[in-house]
Amino acid sequence: MKNRKKDLFSYRDIKTVYTIVLFEKSEAAFHDFPNEYIHQGSNVFDTGLNFKLPQKYTLVPLDIYKKKRHNYGIVNKLDAWLAFLTQEDPEEIIELIDKYPEFMELYQQLYDYCQNIEGVMEMFSKELHELDKNTVKYMIEEQQAEIEQKQKEIEKERREKEQVQKKMEQEIKELKKQLETLQK
């Protein structure tokens, strides 16, 4: 009986799921908050229902971060990660590595990727191949859904025609009876 309790699902067992969205070029709504580059939120219900869902969101407009970073520099690990994602200037990259040497390995990996163009192209080729397969699969699924919809429409039309035909046959029988009655 104890094992049975373990197998039962409870909503409380679901762990929080964090969705982080990085915007390279943020939408206009973000620019209403020029000093904020991290926006956190969760689901809110229009009825005021106070029910916590396990989904949490963090939105990061990187362009706003870059503007703010120029004023304050890299002051903590979060800034270091965001700088890593946005840095293009070699001097700023060196500054980042000086403050946080662990990023050197990541930059080294990026450099190695850039040196191995064939490997990068192969990686993209595999991804494009997978994307092509998924696109074809999606198109087939879409066509299948369309065919099924057409089949339903055809079946509906067939049933409607059968009903009309039955009605016409019934009317023909009634007309024949009326004709027989008139001929007597």
Image (cartoon, rainbow, N blue to C red):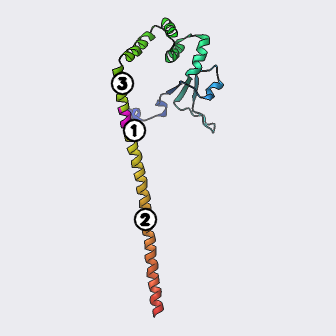
The answer to which of marks 2 and 3 sits earlier in the sequence is 3
Residue visible at 40% across and 48% down in the picture: 143
Residue identified by numbered label 1? 135
Q: Position of residue 94 (x, y in %)?
A: 49, 7
Q: What stretch is highlighted in magenta?
A: 129-135
Proximity of marks 2 and 3: CB atoms separated by less than 8 Å: no
Q: Which of marks 3 and 1 is in front?
A: 3
Crowding around mark 2 (Cα neighbors within 10 Å: few <14, some 14 to 19, many 20+) is few
Proximity of marks 2 and 1: CB atoms separated by less than 8 Å: no
Q: Circle 1 — which element?
A: helix
Residue identified by numbered label 2? 159
Q: Which of marks 2 and 1 is in front?
A: 1
Residue visible at 54% across and 27% down in the picture: 57
The foreground one among 7 and 79 is: 79
Identify the mark at residue 121; answer none if there is no mark.
3
Using residue 53 as the reference point, say whether residue 106 is left or right of it.
left
Eyeballing the image, is 142 above or below 54?
below
Q: Which amino acid does label 2 sit on?
A: Arg
The answer to which of marks 3 and 1 sits earlier in the sequence is 3
Magenta span main SS: helix
